[in-house]
Image (cartoon, rainbow, N blue to C red):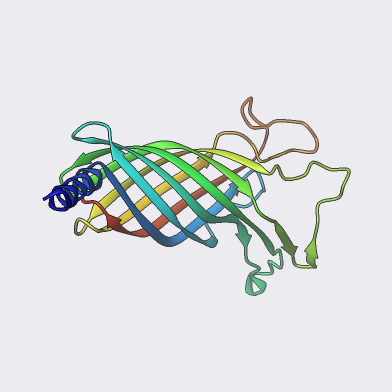
Amino acid sequence: MRYTLLVTILIMGTSISAQQFRAGVSFGVNASQIGGDGYSGFNKAGINTGLFSNTKITKELDFQFEINYSEKGSRKNARPDKDDNDFFLLRMPYIEIPLMVQYHKKNFTYEAGLSYSRLLSSYLEDENGTFEIEPQLNQFSDNDFAFLLGVNFSFTDNIIMNWRFNTSFLPFRKFDSGSNELPFDSGMYHHYVAFTLRYQFLGNL
């Protein structure tokens, strides 16, 4: 009798926990660019993958925590057919930690939040080959802080498509000249659009 009661309590506790706490994995791609590098267009593709967990605040609101591997940067391809030999590539992989508030409406979930990213490495290349920023110039910061906006569509309780826009609100590298084109334009900023497929293996929507 005692063991039956214990098993019943454990099953009930697991069920309640699953209703309040959900977790899963995500995998997708970033299309990124850098404001301030002189090139435009979301031409740099990169991986966006990680883990997420969320818990209900109210019936319609959730709080979501994530830890992701996110490749950001910039790319400009040469076009010799148009006498344009200018090539540029900047790869910057990060560990990214988004904190999101989500609002549910039928199969859609709208989200907004902030993220902190820690730089893992950087790679620079132009038409002359690989290069590094000279030591006397401003270097890339190890930290990036950003705003996020996104929307999710739930195909099932467990399979979710996410579209998200991420933009830095602090520069990750300041201009060497120290001059600003605009009062808030003080350096280089990440911008990317992410498309990820999420699989929720614990809990239901």
Give the answer, above or below, for where 180 lies relative to 127: above
Q: Position of residue 101 (x, y in %)?
A: 34, 35
Q: Residue at x 66, y 48 (%)?
A: 38
Where residue 200 sits, quadrant-wise, is bottom left
Can residue 41 be seen here? no
Can residue 2 be seen here? yes
40 vs 54, left or right, is: right
Find the residue positioned furthest to the front: 1
45 vs 135, left or right, is: left
Find the residue positioned furthest to the left: 1
Q: Residue at x 84, y 43 (%)?
A: 137
Where residue 138 sits, quadrant-wise, is top right
192 vs 138, left or right, is: left
Q: Position of residue 14 (x, y in %)?
A: 23, 48
Find the residue positioned furthest to the bottom: 81
The mark total stands at: 0
Which is more toward the observer, 64 or 189? 64
Give the answer, above or below, for where 26 lies relative to 12: below
Q: Position of residue 154 (x, y in %)?
A: 22, 54
Q: Position of residue 204 (x, y in %)?
A: 21, 51
Q: Residue at x 31, y 46 (%)?
A: 151
31 vs 85, left or right, is: left
Q: Residue at x 70, y 56 (%)?
A: 122
Which is more toward the observer, 160 or 13? 13
Find the residue positioned furthest to the right: 136
